[in-house]
Image: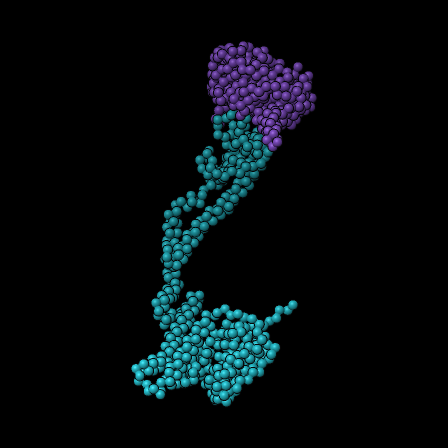
Amino acid sequence: MKKLSTKIWLLVVAFLAFTVLFMYALTNFLYERLYVQDTEDAMIEVGTKLANMYEGGKVNDEFVADIDRYNIYSNMNVFAVRNPRELSACVPFDIDYDTLIGPEERKQLVKGEFIIKQGYEKRFDRQLISVVVPLVDGERLEGILYLYFPLEKITELASKDITLIAVAAFIFLAFMTFMTMKGIGFIMKPLKRLQVAAHDMAHGDYTTRVDVTSKDEIGQLSETFNEMAAAIQQSDEQQKEFLANVSHELRTPISYVKGYSEALAKGLIPQNECEAKLQLIAREAERMEKLTTELLQLSRAERVEKLELMPLALAESLREALILADQRAHAKEMTLTLEADETLIVEADDEKLKQIVVNLIENAIRYSEPGTNVTVRACKVGAMAKIEIEDHGMGIPVEDLPHVAERFYRVNKARSRSDGGSGLGLSIVNQLMKAHNGSWTIESTVGTGTIVTLCLPLYEFEEE
Amino acid sequence: MRLKLLGMMLLASLLAACNHSTYPEIEQQTDFIASVNIQEPSLDFIDKNGKQLAIWPLSEAYSGATLIDDDRILLYGHELDHADLIQLSTGERIAEINTGEGTTNALYDADTKLVYLANSWTNTITAYDIDGNEHAKQKTGKYPMSMLRYEQQLFVVNFKDTTLSVLDAKTLQKRADWKIPASSNGLLAVRDELWIGGHGSGSTPNDAVVRLDIHSGKMLEKFKLPMMPIAFLEQHDEIYVLSHGENILHKLDVHGKEISSEEVGANPFALASFAGHIVVAGYDDHKIYWTDGTSVERSQTVGAGPFQLLVREK
């Protein structure tokens, strides 16, 4: 009972068996209703007509003979009874004799009503349908007409062929059982394939795929499975690449720190260069610290920490972000400009919003020539606040634009170390914007500059 | 307080259960004929002009009744374990006789002042005085039913037996057992003969009246009288016999020779002489028929299933 196909198969077979039984019962029921009712109606009609021949007074021999004659040619059995003993005439007295009609039936007959009986009759030792029609003169029950017909059950009718019917039913059931089993096997084949593929995947084979042979639910399931497998494979590859990148990024500063510190310890560095080397060690350590800090930030952003969303004056937050980035701009002799609509109120986490903007301004500063300007603008577009950070730097080639949010992705691989970026800034921006229910885009022209556009939902004031 | 109330309610319900219904009074001086109806037990009291004096609806399954002297009626039932003695002039019950189930018939004899009750369960005849005290008891054949007191003897027909028990009317001591046909019912003393009717046994209806020598019990030649003669009445040397199988009231002379016959009622079981009429009760049509012995004069409807007719006529 572990296999689904076995369960379905058993269910279908049970339904089939039930259907066979139901058909049997229905046939029996129809027999009772139609055949029995029809016979009953015919007997009532004949009985009533024959009773019309009775003209009152004593039931005479001639009448009895007429009824007997009719009985010879009729397919139903009919006889006249005029013996008061048979008609329960002595009933107030205790009679030890099984009469043809009972005392209650006699009461009914005296009133001129006919009686319909169905069931076992001891007198005839079989199942009967019988109709008793009274022969009444005034209020005297002079006799009765007793009509009866053997009530053969359908099983009795078919008793000769019962073996044949049973064998046929059995063969039919066996054949249907076999066909159902085959049919279910055919239907279940893709499911089996899916199960094998899922098993392979669970054991680390992310390249596994299933053939989609149909468009039904199982076909759709197979397609979804393939999509899922592709997504998992991609995620796995990204994970591996990420780890390789992290190792790579850390290895260079570590080798610097290790090499120079060993050389210093062994006195291999001339005295006059010692300070410069120590500064180099400190710079590389700082770089490592920055990298690990950003990794931590990214990890937190990906885990979608609960943001403390609150209404914020956007211009104020942007101004503070500019102040944070100002020192760096100053160092590169660059200027920062803010053009913001002072009325905008956004729903955001203050700290995270500033982190986003600072990240983007630092990126802009990093990839711009000294003496250029970075402009931050903010305005309202529909229910959103639009923030633009525009620089006049080197720009990003079109083919790289879709990948800039990937971790450790660098446009210029060769400049990875010298530009001072970790390759995580835009990944963090991407995660934080998602957490704010916002969106962002990047446009760039090589040699001209880059514009990053952020869209954040405006705070909705509740109407009083 | 609640307990007290509960006790009172219990007492009230007990009293209600014990309280036998009181029937409408029947004036002591009025002659009547009463039909004992057993399909839905009731008594119809009718005066000589056919006027209904009273109807007693019976709450128990009584199957028969007999008058005791002028002012008492004994009601008994085959399925009841007791018989009730009711005073007609007050309609109140004056005694209950513990008969045990199976009472088939009761006969009151004014000479001995004894009521004889036949019981089909114990196959006994028990004699009680008019206050319901047991006087004597005697075992009979199977299913004693029809009874007739003749001189110092009580004749008892055993319905499911082939014997007639002859008992002493006072002591109930058995004097003889005479041979008769099974399912015999109804008997009458005619001169020195005892006439016995019956239903017949099995599916064969009886169509004859059996005659016995009333002193020796010797079987005399029976005479044909179809179909199922079961009730007899003698009046002015004329014998009336009721054949319920053919609904015929026969009028015979004392030798059994038919004088006339008339179709009366539907399945009649009882006949009686009252106010110069022969009255017949039709069990199936719930009517009593007033006849002059040869033809029906009038009929009137009574309760369902009149089975016995009781007459008080001074």
Q: According to the rendering, which colour does chain B have?
A: purple
Residue B82 image offset from top left, x and y in percent: 55, 22
Residue A61, can we see it? no
Q: Quadrant of residue A464?
A: bottom right
Where B70 falls versus A367 (above or below)? above
- Foreground of the two, A449 or B144: A449
Q: Is residue A254 left or right of residue B36?
A: left
Query: In the rendering, what colour is chain A?
Result: cyan
B22 or A138: which is nearer to us? B22
| Residue A34, x across and y down, in percent | 51, 46
* The image quarter in which residue B6 lies: top right
Q: Residue B313: in sight, yes or no?
A: yes
Count the labels in the image: 0
Which residue is painted at 43% across and 51% down in the image?
A18
Q: How is the image coloured?
A: by chain
A25 lies above or below A246:
above
| Nearer to me, A62 or A393 | A393
Give the vertical position of A338 relative to B139 (above or below).
below
Residue A423 in which image quadrant: bottom left
For the point 56% across and 24% down, the residue is: B63
Residue at image point 43% right, 75% down? A293
Q: Position of residue A433 (x, y in %)?
A: 50, 75
Residue at x 37%, y 55% (from the top left corner): A1
Q: Is A210 in front, or is A35?
A: A210
Left or right, A274 with respect to B4, comes to: left
Q: Residue A317 in the image: state x and y as whole percent.
A: 55, 77
